[in-house]
Structures are given as structure tokens and as C-alpha cells.
Amino acid sequence: MADIILKKLNIKVWRQNNAASKGKFETYPIENVSTGSSFLEMMDILNNDLIEKGIDPIAYDHDCREGICGTCSLYINGRPHGPDTQVTTCQLHMRKFKDGETITIEPWRAAALPVIKDLIVDRTAFEKILQAGGFISVNTGGVPDANSILVNYDDAEESMDAAACIGCGACVAACKNSSAMLFVSAKVSHLAKLPQGKIEAKKRAKSMVGKMDELGFGGCTNTQACEAECPKSISITNIARLNREYLVARISE
């Protein structure tokens, strides 16, 4: 399919100087955008236009632009990462929009992920949750033989599925309670399914859930919005596993 040129779009974007200032929406026109362009390429074009006009460019996070790092976290037209499924913002293409459309772009809205500037939020809360228990105590010497620790095939597959989480925060943005349960459950599950993760198993879930609550994330009410908007299709079955791991940890206290 040949690319089409979108002659004009209106970009309604959240502008906020810093965490302490009050933000507001600003609308900017942009012309002649190819439907073959990625959403972030469109943002680059818009920023070039703003710079030429002497306007402060829109601040937003990005890194790999390959759907791996999870930093391109934008809330687009009411959905995390925009109107496509199983993609990050950098994988979203302008063919998903219509000529003359107004595209609304916001940062993640969660107390635990405060806005730093414009569309950039502080996601260090995720790092603190991982520091609380998302690790294993193993010798980091030479690489062991692949067959030295046998892992059941189904367990290995479930672990890898959970490990696909890139920590983008779409689950938090999609949740009406700003819960991080899908993120935490994925990080707990990919270790809980492997023998290497058994050393910290009794404290991992309790420590990570405790840190999540401390940082101000909300509770899970099982609406499944997190799973629906996750770009890596992380399953909410991981939340059930997290609850089980947490219960075992509390019983063994």
C-alpha cells in the first residue's frame, strides 16, 4: 500500500515546564505528514517546526525506537501508546490517523509517575520496586553449562512471556486506579518460574508489593485494562501468581 500524505493535522499536546508548574494543552498545526512515518517521526517534524518559529520544542522520552526500551510512553487519543494494539508509541504509524484529525497527546497520569516536563514522567518508582526484590542471588562468575540447571519447558516459556515486560508503564496509565500490579507480577513471575529465583522467593513478592504500595500506586480491581493495553501482551494470570507468591510469603513469616 502506497503512503498517503496527511495534508493537515492538529496536535493538541500537554505542555508543562516542570513538576511544580501548572500544565495546559496547546494545539499546533502540522502539514504534509506521510502515513508511512512513525508517530515519533511526526513529533520530530513538529518540533523542528516549533524551533523554527522560536517555540520551545515538546519534551518527550524516546530511545531505541524499536519497541524494546519502553521509554516512548505517550497517552494518545485516550489510549496508552495510541490507537493500535501490541505496539509501543515508536511502533505506531501515522496511517492510524485521518487527514484533518486532532490528535491529543498527554503524559501518563499517575501520582507515582509525576510529570518532569511536558510528556516526560519520572518512572524511577519502577526502579525502586525492582530494587526491592526483582533480583536473584547467584554467583556471577563464568557462564554455567546450559544443561546444568534443568528447567521444565512450560515453566521456561511462562517465564520468558513474563520477562517480555519492558516497564513502559502502559498498565499504570490504563488502570483507573493507577495500579502497577501487572508490572510487578511480570517481574515476580519471570523469576518465580525459574529455579534460580527460589532463593528470594519468600520475600520477593512481599517486598515488591510493599514498595509498590509505599510509592503510591493504586490497588488492582481486575478490570483487565492493563492486559488490553500492554504492548507486550503480558497476561493478568501473572497477577494471580503474584497474589499466590505474596500469600505464601505472609504465611511463612
Image (spheres, rainbow, N blue to C red):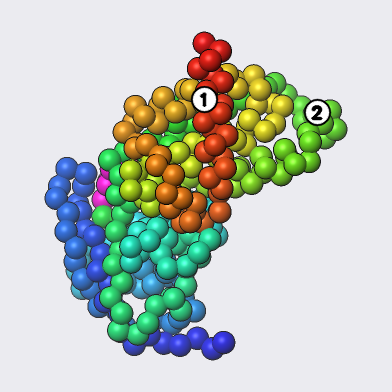
Q: Residue at x 76, y 27 (%)?
A: 142
> Which quadrant holds residue 136?
top right
Residue at coordinates 43% horizontally, 53% vertically from top-left? 225
- In the image, is residue 71 above or below residue 217? below
Q: Residues within 10 Å of mark 2 (few under 14, many from 20)?
A: few
Type of amino acid under label 1: Tyr
Mark 1, residue position: 246
Q: Is residue 224 left or right of residue 147?
A: left
Residue 29 in the image: state x and y as whole percent: 25, 78
Q: Residue at x 47, y 22 (%)?
A: 207
Q: Relative to 159, is 122 on the left or the right?
A: left
Residue 120, magenta (yes or no): no
Q: Which quarter of the picture shows residue 72? A: bottom left
In the displayed image of the protein, which residue is found farthest to the left? 22
Q: Which residue is under mark 2?
A: 149
In the image: residue 143, left or right of residue 189: right
Q: Label for residue 31?
A: none
Q: Residues within 10 Å of mark 1 (few under 14, many from 20)?
A: many
Helix, strand or loop for disc 2: loop
Task: Inspect the image, locate mark 2, and give the three-letter code of the amino acid beneath it.
Answer: Ile
> Which span is picked out in magenta?
113-117
- The residue at the point 34 percent across, 27 percent down is 214
Label located before the other in sequence (2 or 1): 2
Q: Please name whichever residue, 66 or 191, is drawn nearer the observer in this view of the structure.
A: 191
Q: Residue 197 at what x, y percent from top left?
A: 65, 26
Quick check: can you spot residue 63?
no
- Residue 141 appears in view: yes
Local secondary structure at mark 1 = helix
Q: Is residue 97 above or below residue 252?
A: below
CA gap, disc 2 and disc 1: 25 Å
